[in-house]
């Protein structure tokens, strides 16, 4: 197993108010903490660590993990957006629970309500309950929950609702629902209240959502290949509900984006892939559709296809607390449309709560592409995905080593260090090797203290200095 960088980053942040460590499966205490996070600012729970952040391997993990999921999803009410999963870490597995601040406060466990105070969880007192109830009343008037007066059940795609119920039941992230009783499903998630459909229900399941909400539209524009790339070559307009629209965009990408053929540096097998990492594209699109400002009637999602990049723009700005650099690491998730996000999560369209932007960045980094760039201003958020390799410069020292290296020779970092008679530091050696790996001029053959490297067939660039 590997050192999980995301888990490592969470431990390093040490945000006591939003992080709680458990050495074992104490269901009741874990449930209380989740409940407190839902009622406060959200947070994360790691099971398998002591209070000092030291790994403490869990016993009988699979059975206790299943019992934990069942306990949390059944005992905490109302239902909420909670991600529970296993993560590899060093020589063991740990449990990560990610909790987004709830939109249906107060949340309770076994008829008791809890809140977070600093690094501790406590039972809510009268003042806490008053604050939670005021928050609940404000949420009742959110755009998502507002009724669409002229819409009826006949305006919904019942087959799409049945698919969502099947997916939700399969993912086991919620109570199970009967496939032939879609109204129970809609009512449970406040998509149908007082015999009226909500805006969120139209976004998710309407046959013709743009009839009621024109802002549900997605527009794909293909730009020309000239120097300015300001000429439209084709425009595709998608006016389906969120689930169908997402599928149509996936189909479009598969049909129209360039395919790259690559050869492995080790076994020389050819692999074909889209010019852009598929998982990142999916995550970027679903994020734009989930997090757009639907209250803006002109706020369609725009996907611009350029020769060397894709730009995805949605209405609505990032919270002031989040900047571009924050989206590339562990950060607090604040979904503007928690009801829509909850349904999308239950159906498995997003795998990891609050980690979409991190996944996007990792996928591009793994392919050596220019890093994604988010920009939020003037009422909109744009994400630029580059299809070109990240520029990595090598110096004369690296060039000298690789030029004299036999392509079949495997070497260690220590041997790289010893190659230079004038002497370089261990830190410099690590930096050099890291850059050569990132640029694809070296292949890593193993992990651990005796890691070895092999020169690849990639042509060396000119020396940068």
Image: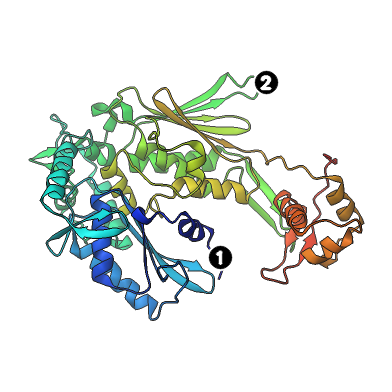
Mark 1 nearby-residue class (10 Å; few <14, some 14–19, many ≥20) = few
- For mark 1, what is the residue? 3
Looking at the image, the residue that sits furthest to the bottom is 60
Quick check: 208 left or right of 4? left
The x and y percentages for residue 399 are 86, 49
How many dots with numbers?
2
Residue 354 pos. (x, y %): 39, 49
Please identify the quadrant where the C terminus is shown: top right
Q: Nearer the viewer, mark 1 or mark 2?
A: 1
Element carrying mark 2: loop
Q: In the picture, which quadrant includes the N terminus?
A: bottom right
Above or below for 341 versus 448: above
- The numbered mark, 1 or 2, whose residue comes first in the sequence reads 1
Q: Nearer the viewer, residue 3 or 391?
A: 3
- Tell me where residue 171 appears, x and y as whole percent: 33, 61
Of 50 and 140, nearer the camera is 50
Question: What x and y, as percent, mark residue 117?
Answer: 26, 54
SS at badge 1: loop
Q: Quadrant of residue 446?
A: bottom right
- Within 10 angstroms of label 2, few (less than 14), some, or many (20 or more) residues? few
Is residue 226 depicted above or below 137 in this figure?
Answer: above
For disc 2, the marked residue is 227
Residue 162 seen from this side: no
**Residue in the picture at 30% in, 23% down:** 297
Q: Residue at x 20, y 64 (%)?
A: 74
462 or 249: nearer the eye? 462
**Residue 464 visible in the shown view:** yes
Q: Is residue 21 above or below residue 227?
A: below
Label of residue 350 in the image: none
């Amino acid at each position: 197993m590997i050192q999980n960088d995301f888990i490592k980053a969470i431990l390093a942040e040490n945000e006591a108010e939003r992080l709680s460590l458990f050495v074992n499966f104490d269901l009741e205490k874990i449930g209380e903490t989740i409940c407190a996070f839902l009622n406060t600012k959200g947070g994360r729970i790691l099971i398998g660590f002591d209070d000092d952040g030291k790994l403490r391997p869990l016993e009988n993990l699979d059975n206790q993990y299943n019992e934990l999921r069942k306990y949390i999803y059944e005992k905490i009410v109302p239902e909420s957006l909670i991600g529970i999963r296993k993560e590899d870490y060093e020589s063991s597995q740990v449990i990560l629970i990610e909790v987004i601040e709830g939109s249906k406060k107060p949340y309770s466990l076994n008829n008791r309500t809890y809140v977070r105070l600093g690094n501790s969880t406590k039972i809510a007192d009268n003042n806490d309950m008053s604050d939670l109830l005021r928050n609940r009343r404000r949420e009742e008037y959110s755009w998502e929950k507002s009724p669409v007066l002229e819409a009826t059940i006949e305006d919904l795609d019942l087959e799409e609702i049945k698919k969502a119920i099947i997916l939700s039941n399969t993912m086991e992230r919620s109570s199970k629902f009967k496939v032939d009783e879609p109204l129970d499903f809609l009512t449970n998630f406040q998509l149908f209240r007082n015999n009226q459909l909500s805006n969120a229900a139209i976004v998710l399941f309407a046959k013709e959502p743009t009839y009621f909400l024109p802002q549900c539209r997605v527009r794909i524009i293909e730009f020309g290949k000239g120097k300015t790339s300001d000429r439209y070559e084709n425009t595709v307009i998608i006016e389906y509900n969120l689930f169908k629209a997402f599928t149509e965009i996936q189909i479009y990408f598969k049909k129209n984006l360039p395919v790259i053929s690559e050869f492995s540096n080790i076994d020389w097998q050819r692999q074909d892939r889209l010019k852009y990492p598929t998982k990142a594209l999916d995550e970027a699109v679903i994020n734009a559709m989930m997090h757009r400002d639907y209250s803006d009637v002109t706020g369609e999602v725009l996907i611009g296809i350029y020769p060397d990049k894709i730009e995805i723009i949605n209405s609505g700005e990032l919270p002031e607390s989040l900047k571009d650099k924050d989206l590339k690491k562990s950060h607090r998730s604040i979904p503007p449309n928690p009801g829509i996000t909850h349904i999308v999560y239950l159906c498995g369209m997003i795998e990891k709560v609050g980690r979409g932007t991190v996944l996007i960045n990792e996928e591009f980094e793994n392919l050596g592409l220019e890093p994604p760039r988010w920009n939020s201003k003037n009422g909109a958020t744009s994400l630029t995905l580059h299809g070109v390799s990240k520029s990595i410069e090598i110096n004369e020292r690296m060039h000298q080593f690789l030029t004299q290296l036999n392509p079949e020779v495997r070497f260690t970092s220590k041997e790289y260090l010893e190659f230079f008679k004038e002497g370089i530091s261990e830190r410099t050696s690590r930096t050099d090797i890291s850059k050569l790996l990132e640029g694809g001029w070296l292949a890593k053959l193993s992990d651990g203290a005796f890691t070895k490297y092999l020169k690849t067939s990639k042509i060396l660039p000119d020396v940068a200095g």
